[in-house]
Amino acid sequence: MATKKIIAICQSGGEFVTNKDGTLSYNGGDAYAIDIDDETELDNFKSEVADMFSCSADNMTIKYLLPGNKKTLISISKDKDLKRMINFVADTMSVDVFIISEEAAARNISNMPASRSSRTTVSEAVVPVVAADDVDMTNAIDMPEGTPLSAIPPDSNDDSHRKAAQQWENTITGLGQRFNSFTEFREALHKYSIAHGFAYRYKKNDSHRVTVKCKSQGCPWRIYASRLATTQLICIKKMSSKHTCEGAAVKAGYRATRGWVGNIIKEKLKSSPNYKPKDIADDIKREYGIQLNYSQAWRAKEIAREQLQGSYKEAYTLLPYFCEKIKETNPGSVVTFTTKDDSSFHRLFVSFHASISGFQQGCRPLLFLDSTPLNSKYQGTLLAATAADGDDGIFPVGFAVVDAETEENWHWFLQELKTAVSTSPDSQQITSQDSQQITFVADFQNGLKKSVAEVFDKCYHSYCLRHLAEKLNKDLKGQFSHEARRFMIDDFYAAAYAPKLEAFQSSAESIKSISPDAYNWVVQSEPEHWANAFFAGARYNHLSSNFGQQFYSWVSDAHELPITQMVDVLRGKMMESIYTRRVQSNQWITKLTPSKEEILKNEIAVSRSFQVLLVHGATFEVRGDVVEIVDIDHWDCTCKGWQLTGMPCCHAIAVFECIGRDPYEYCSRFFTTEIYRLTYAESIHPVPNVDRPLVCESTEEVAVTVTPPPTKRPPGRPKMKQPESVDIIKRQLQCSKCKGLGHNKKTCKDS
């Protein structure tokens, strides 16, 4: 069968005009003829067109008009579209094809998916602008770096749009002007074109010479620059500075790239790290008359951030050096990292000496394990172990950046943590580990139940109450109404906090009255790992692992930074916290920390209404609304308040008042001001040259190569860790007809 051949008259650089009868005409621009047939592939066609018009094949839109229909433009986006066009126009033997840059196409196309692969800088922007004065750029699409983002004509009546651009009107002064490099010349030319409101295209653009002319056909404006003989300087040797194109300033609009916008906002982003994309777009529109959509502004911010903070990729390369600098500036710190077989980053563990010493000397043997996602370019997860100081403040002990939250990574983290907290401190002190086994408050999933028991063979593992409640709610979802699940969750929390067996059983029976299945779930969930009535370790009434919310807020402020800078920001936050609390505690005049001092005073006030009777030796009976038995030798009361909190309860204090004992002597030593000060006795020191190593100090460092992990940030808005206050129970749909859950009457199967 004979191949259909036609001539494609390819036109570009002009503009569409709507005639009175609604038909479209194309005026201006250049035209070339290309032979095509029904075997021509679109990629080959685009490549030939790109060579003819000196533009990028990736940044063009191809359209044509149907025979007999001059009102509707048809787009060609795949090979099938190209063959369909050939079939439509085969009888005429030729077809007018219009080549439109993505920028021009963006004027009539709503938000399309944006490229994430750009790496071109503003000085490399060479793609010409196609602009018109009768279009709205509000919905301009995002394009690869170097492609103009938008072309908005300047408003002659609005000086604010021209205010910032006026500072660039003289970046090009004329013949003889010299520049240090072609990059500097191109950037100056770029700013000059924005200030004067015209578009240009490169005729020659290499490492020896640059020739540029006005984009408007027939306009004599042009400029030629080349290297000055026997020097490295670039000099303007020819320039025709006048424009004859009609309305050049109006039609050409502005030429702006994401890199250019990034340069513009860089200084403001430095002083305002939370500079929002919406505010960026508003500022660019107000100062330059250029309209950006949210995606364009967001990506411009990404470019500016990388210019300020350095490359994410470089940060991984510097990781070995960074770890050595931490150990050098903070002796006694535990810092380790591992890579995968392909040298890509796997995980990093950091525990500063001041954190290790503070935990050993002043913190309760209580650690909270939790994780939070990192929404940086390469994703990952941060695992953390935090402790509680004597005033119930958050004290970070160690943290790790890992590629994913897996059983293997948790096991590795716990091994590194054990190495850190087992390290002998330099100074003499009473370590918390000497007196009690460590209690962990952590989730029981992701392999934690197994790993905690294996790594810390002598410890207590308290299941995080919040994670348990979430699992209970998830397992019950679809079986019970919102109100019923609410009651069961409330009863579950009451059972966990119940100090005595009787109170636990009462709460469990309340759950059973609603659902025997839920009751069985509670009984089988190992209450000895979460209920106060059974748990053998010392949790000091902390039952949830997300105790370290302040630390995770620090992470959320720094998670978008390159890995070395993120760790250094966390180091800075910890350093500042240690210094601030040390200074504050030096002003305290009480024996206990402020929060514990207040608790003790409240208990003393309550104790005055009790009657105390001696039973035997150190055992006393305390009568109030109920009768409790206090054993002062064993720091025990049948109300269990003393054992659960580490602070004497009101019944014990009534005994102390009766026999003349000092209640301060019966408070846990971890709550004293003296021990609190030991927690913050050591300092975290700065780590200089985080991202600028001077020289590698050993050949071993040079041999270690770390590359970014293969993961990248997925599309969509990042999901941050939910705070504890968020309601874990969400109301389900309930059918008003059959009263079933999970659907409404419109989708009810009974109807």
Image: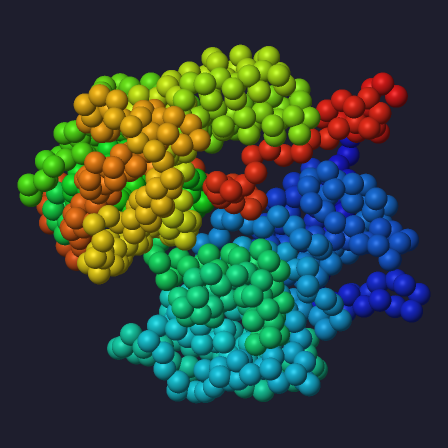
Of residues 620 and 566, the one nearer the viewer is 620
Picture quadrant where residue 214 is located: bottom right
State left or right for residue 330 relative to residue 405: left
Query: Residue 282's x, y, as percent?
Result: 59, 69
Q: Is 391 left or right of 89, judged from the image as shown? A: left
Q: Position of residue 570 (x, y in %)?
A: 31, 50
What colour scheme was applied to this rendering of the protein?
rainbow
Would you place residue 314 above or below residue 643 in this image? below
Q: Residue at x 57, y 58 (%)?
A: 296
Q: Quadrant of the N terminus?
A: top right
**Image position, residue 501 (x, y; %):** 42, 18
Q: Residue at x 27, y 44 (%)?
A: 389
Of the pair 495 and 617, the residue shown nearer to us: 617
Image spot of residue 675 (x, y percent): 18, 45
Q: Is residue 15 left or right of residue 469?
A: right
Q: Is residue 426 above or below residue 527?
A: below
Query: Looking at the rendering, in which quadrant would you find the C terminus?
Result: top right
Camera-nearest residue between 636 and 144: 636
Query: Does the image show residue 446?
Result: no
Residue 726 in the image: above or below residue 280 = above
Q: Is residue 145 above or below residue 15?
A: above
